[in-house]
Image (cartoon, helix red, strand yellow):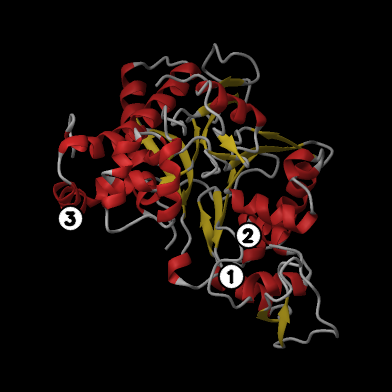
Amino acid sequence: MATAGETPSEPRPGDRRTWVPYPDYPDLVWPYTHLNEPEITSKFEELAQWGTLGDTDYATLQPCTNPYEASQDRHVIHNWEIDGRIWRFRGLFDGHGGHETVDYTFQSLPSSILDRLSSRVRDKQHWEPIDITQLLGQTIVEFDNNIGQAFVDLVPGASIKELPDVQLEAIVNDPKNLDAVTRCMRGTTVLIALVDPDSANLWVASLGDCTAILGTKNPSGTWSTQTLSFDHNGHNPAESVRVTLEHHGESGCVEDDRVLGAIAVTRAIGDFVFKLPSVYTERGLLKCRVGFRTQKKVDELLPRVITPPYVSNVPQITHIPLGSSSKTTGSGGDQLRDATVPAGSNTSSESSSPSRSSGNSPVLLLFSDGLGDLYEDEFHLNPASVAGFWPETMKSVMSASTATTGNGSHTNAAMGFIRVGLGGTDSEKVSKSLTSEYSGRWMDDTTVLVTRL
């Protein structure tokens, strides 16, 4: 959230006040209600969807109450029993442009992975970590390819070019075809974590700009952290160079840190405006009456879609051995990053697990980019660029969540990480974050999962 212009005098609980969220726009003035404790925590708990499922704390927050601005973040917490042993699966999906693709992905991608994982484990008892890495990558790529193919199959061959407009419009607006069409019009990031039954191996697969951080508490009480995900957006020089090299000779493939000047992420599920030849958008997707949220921008983008795809569906996958007792071999050292894999509360669980593990067990933090935005606004820095930021934050939040008892949000580490970004103990900052009165969203959807490994 942007730095506020302060109003004079000390606020009192329940005061209706105003603030200027963006100093460059002094005429933009928002009202808010000042709160103190315990009202702040009560409001936070009211607006967030939060809780604990087994070994995982979860929380998601979008304080804007306009239904049009409802959160497009989704998450899953699954424990899968395969041959009598439990694999832990955690997923975070940050949708954009609408809900259709993220809803389909978080409902269907985990089951696709489970089906393949079950077959692989049963067929190959002595699997290697690279087997799981390849399985995750192949499943994600094929899942996305199938979304695009379902739309292309509605207008096979040259029919997308040859059929009259009225017939194409009828096809894309036929109720039985709308799912296939809208899933191509929207998009979502993917961040998934998988832990084997021995808690000896961790895999993290990422598409987009959600973040995974592994934290370990040292005997001294300090924390060490390691980022396991990748930033797939135009701010990442490696991704910007990759996109540019894949379209040699085309100017502006990444412009203003956005692919074709339009989309922030360089890898995602969906977003087939950037993956299919432009004729499929011009004569197909644009005729869907549901529409894009930015219809005009899509029209203006089409002349730049020359050699798709510009947005990739190939995930980058990190494998981490969690202990020396792992039954697997050939993990490629301490860390294997496979960047060339071949082409209400959203939680569920098939099996229960212990609610809390040892205080010294590793902790896996997954979060959508909304949390990073909150931290940048609160601390005026990019957390990823500051040495020591995540170890100190991990120590502070995890210590606070285990130092108290009860059922309130103070014991929920996911809520703790979000509270830090909202302003921590600064009642005025947190009040502005939670109670501003504006028809649009003033902060990005923010979701956090904290799993004790």
Q: Is residue 362 visible?
A: no
Is label 1 in contact with label 2 (beta carbons under 8 Å)? yes
Direction from residue 317 to residue 13 in the image, left or right: right
Q: Is residue 441 left or right of residue 177?
A: right
Q: If the image is split into quadrants, where does the C terminus sit?
A: top right
- Type of amino acid under label 1: Glu
Q: Which mark is residue 45?
A: 1
Mark 2, secondary structure of its residue? helix
Is residue 63 in sight in this rendering? Answer: yes
Percent position (x, y) of residue 159?
Answer: 16, 35
Q: Which mark is residue 175?
A: 3
Please tell me which residue lies in front, 19 or 411.
19
Q: Which residue is mark 2?
A: 415
Identify the residue at image location x=53%, y=61%: 50
| Percent coordinates x, y for residue 274 in the rendering | 42, 37
Q: Residues within 10 Å of mark 3 (few under 14, many from 20)?
A: few
Question: Identity of the amino acid at label 2?
Answer: Met
| Image-based side of 395 in relation to 100, left or right | right
